[in-house]
Image (cartoon, rainbow, N blue to C red):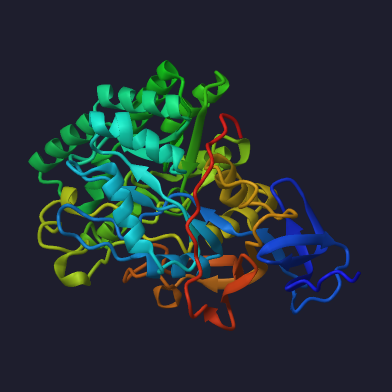
Amino acid sequence: MTAAQPDLVIRGGTIVTAADRFRADLAVSGGRITQIAEHVAGGAEEIDATGLLLLPGGIDAHVHLAQEQGDGTVMADGFGSGTRSAVAGGNTTVLPFALQRRGQSLREAVAAYHALAEGQCWCDLSFHMIITDPTPQVLGQELPALVREGYTSFKVFMTYDDMVLNDAQLLEVFDVARREGALVMVHAEGHDAIKHMTRKLEEAGQTAPYFHAEAHSRIAEREATHRAISHAELVDVPVVIVHVSGRDPMEQIQWAKRRGLNVFAETCPQYIALTRDDLKGLNMDFEGAKYVCSPPPRDHDSQEAIWQGLRDGTFDLFSSDHCPFFFEEAGGRGKDNPRARTAFKWVPNGIPGVETRLPILFSEGVSKGRITLERFVALTATNPARLYGMYPQKGALVIGADADITLWDPQRRCTLRQEHLHHGADYTPYEGMEITGWPVRTILRGQTVFSEAGGVAERPEGTYLARGKSPRRL
């Protein structure tokens, strides 16, 4: 009996995993990888990948799409433009957030984001939840039920007036996570310290966007990171400290890891490619608002610390924290709005980055010899899949896995320009950055969803993923 012809064969490329690299052909049938061998028989479709790398499709585990802003600010990306941008940047899965507003049912929030995403996604996705109102109903019924339905991770905030949880609430939420086997993501910045510094800066007339970095100090991030880890140790629950900006919070994480605590860490492109000086703009002007995010970029010493952490295992994940806002557009409901012009505290926090995440890390990391190819794959695909309950369906080039593959040209050189990107924002904070290494084709479950020659596919084919529970160790 003759074996069925594969749907797709990719020939001549170098397959890279989190542990190895080798030359081989790869066959796909029914959306899954069916064969990896020195030579595979002909397929219905064939791709010559000579000179290219075959990487697991990128998994961006921290993106914000279509997220409601309480002050009327408009987010620049919904699920359509955001996931188009994602696949153009070599990603095949994203994990956005379903934000619960205070007074809202957690289940209602999840349903609302599903409705926004339905039929709009060019890549696969799964939701983290954001808990801002941990009522007895949420903690006793909704959260446990949603975790059992595959929403196995959620985020909590230690700052922002409309999101912050106090210590008692954090401990209660952590306790439910431990009991139900959920993973907690923590935005670790000290709310009271930020409020104090903001007030002092305003009293001194220091209100330009640059002073956002002063208010959101490394000390406030360090203190909150230590407090989050202490709460997690007390309750014995795994946590992810997200978007870590530099040496101070890293030292807290390293302390926790040395003690064997279940603490994971994530960092982002802004902390290796930007510094607080970018918030000065042209001359301490409002152009600096383009770079306002929390925590803010720090300094060159922080960048060096981040690189060391990416190499030595301090960091488990490299995500974008894609949180896009318009700068000049959106009718005064973007970063450049009348209230934001009065003080940095009103500037919408967040920058676009889902499309540029992988190229920046590859160029600055792999191409410049700071990290290996295998480490790149681990940080951007395999570890996110493992940590968030999607492995080995996602994040791996192995038999039986979804055929989510990024073809990468390690020699391609280009300059990042807003005009070439697919996100909804009207700027990129990485304008003019020189890049070596670029994704030239993105394949989702065996189907090309982006290529240099054809652009983004005509129709969205992304599906929703219910996830398993997270391991306590990677």
User: Is residue 163 visible in the rendered structure shown here?
Assistant: yes
Q: Is residue 271 above or below residue 309?
A: below
Measuring from the top left, give residue 251's x and y in whole percent: 47, 28
Q: Residue at x 34, y 69 (%)?
A: 427
Most extreme residue toward the top, as rendered?
Answer: 234
Which of these two is toward me, 396 or 223? 396
Measuring from the top left, give residue 131's x and y in whole percent: 30, 39
Q: Residue at x 65, y 68 (%)?
A: 446
Q: Taking 314 as reference, is 54 left or right?
A: right
Measuring from the top left, give residue 418's x and y in whole percent: 40, 73
Most extreme residue toward the bottom, as rendered?
Answer: 453
> Splitting the image into 4 quarters, where does residue 233 fall?
top left
Most extreme residue toward the right, as rendered?
Answer: 1
Which of these two is toward me, 231 or 250? 231
Which of these two is toward me, 251 or 262? 262
Most extreme residue toward the left, as rendered?
Answer: 203
Quadrant occupied by the N terminus: bottom right
